[in-house]
Amino acid sequence: MKNIKVGIIGGTNGMGKWFARLLRKEGYTIHVCGRKTKLQINDLARLCNVIVVSVPISATATIIKEVGPLLTKDQLLMDLTSLKKEPVKLMLANTQAEVIGCHPLFGPQLKDVSKQNVILCPARGKKWLGWLKSVLKKNKMSISETTPDRHDKMMAIVQVLNHLNTITLGMALAETKIPLTEMNKYSTPFFRIKLDIIKKVFTESPEMYLDIIMGNPETEIVLDLYQKAMIDIHRKIKFGSRAKSQETVLKTARKLYRKDQ
Ligand SMILES: NC(=O)c1ccc[n+]([C@@H]2O[C@H](COP(=O)([O-])OP(=O)(O)OC[C@H]3O[C@@H](n4cnc5c(N)ncnc54)[C@H](OP(=O)(O)O)[C@@H]3O)[C@@H](O)[C@H]2O)c1
């Protein structure tokens, strides 16, 4: 199996670069391409058994449509996209190769990936699934297999709701017009953690977070849920109903931490 050659489209940076490093460490031959590399998509398709798509979400559909038809039944087409429904559907429609959707639930900066979650959506063929799982397992990652639909539903909570919350907190903080240096002087450990998360979302790759929010098919449902919760607690606090605010918090705690869960 060590003579497997893997081509990573978008392997010059971010998650693609992380995956290239991991696979090189395991002894595989890796070719990467970006928009300006000498090797291009057609070279990778010709040279490699496995093709990985790891480009920004906004470019993913175009890249899948370009590379998919160049592959044969013996090859594997997989992706690392943070969304799964649309990319997996497009991979199935545009190639005869085996298809696996893969989403590592961490960023490329993370030093130790052991115990970190990776979601796999096997979509066509079984030949390559064992290989991919063995590489991830060898590096102690925790693998769950599911459908693209279920993946996107869960990401609507883990990513969409979560990042929406960070974005609205950042927007509200900016509106206070109090400089961050001043906020830091008054910060608690808990608030400093939140400020770090806000900084990451607003400065590291805001486009990716917006693509994750706007590209998820469940986003509208989550937006409504979030707005409903905001209106609910806003009303109870604004009209000074301590009993009702407390009842909301206790009821939520009971729902979240029920013993039978
Ligand atoms: N970052 C995360 O935390 C994270 C976590 C899990 C999954 N993901 C997923 O991983 C994928 C890549 O995200 P990333 O954060 O790694 O992005 P990134 O750091 O911006 O890297 C994107 C890569 O794609 C290449 N690229 C950009 N535009 C391209 C285009 N139009 N055509 C071909 N190649 C292009 C870039 O190469 P050049 O600039 O050299 O052209 C670069 O190598 C996304 O689908 C994202 O949802 C990201």
Image (cartoon, rainbow, N blue to C red):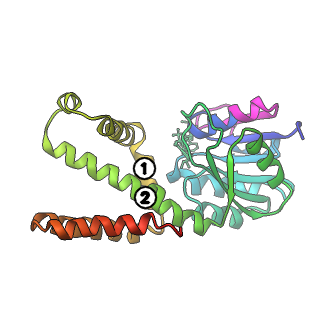
Image region (quadrant) for ligand 1? top right
Q: Secondary structure at mark 1?
A: helix
> Which residues lie in the magenta part?
21-40
Name the kind of residue labelled 1 in the image.
Tyr
Nearest the viewer among 67 and 147 is 147
Q: Which residue is mark 1?
A: 209
Q: Position of residue 47 (x, y in %)?
A: 82, 40
Q: Give left or right: position of 189 versus 205.
A: left
Residue 160 tag number: 2
Packing grade of label 1 (10 A; few <14, some 14-19, many >=20) is many
Q: Quadrant of residue 227?
A: bottom left
Q: At 19% across and 32% down in the image, what residue appears? A: 186
The residue lying toward the viewer, choosing from 158 and 41, is: 158
Image position of 44 with respect to 238: above or below: above
Label located before the other in sequence (2 or 1): 2
Q: Secondary structure at mark 2?
A: helix
Amino acid of disc 2: Val
Residue 226 visible from this viewpoint: yes
Kindly identify the residue that appears in the image at 33 percent across and 41 percent down. 194
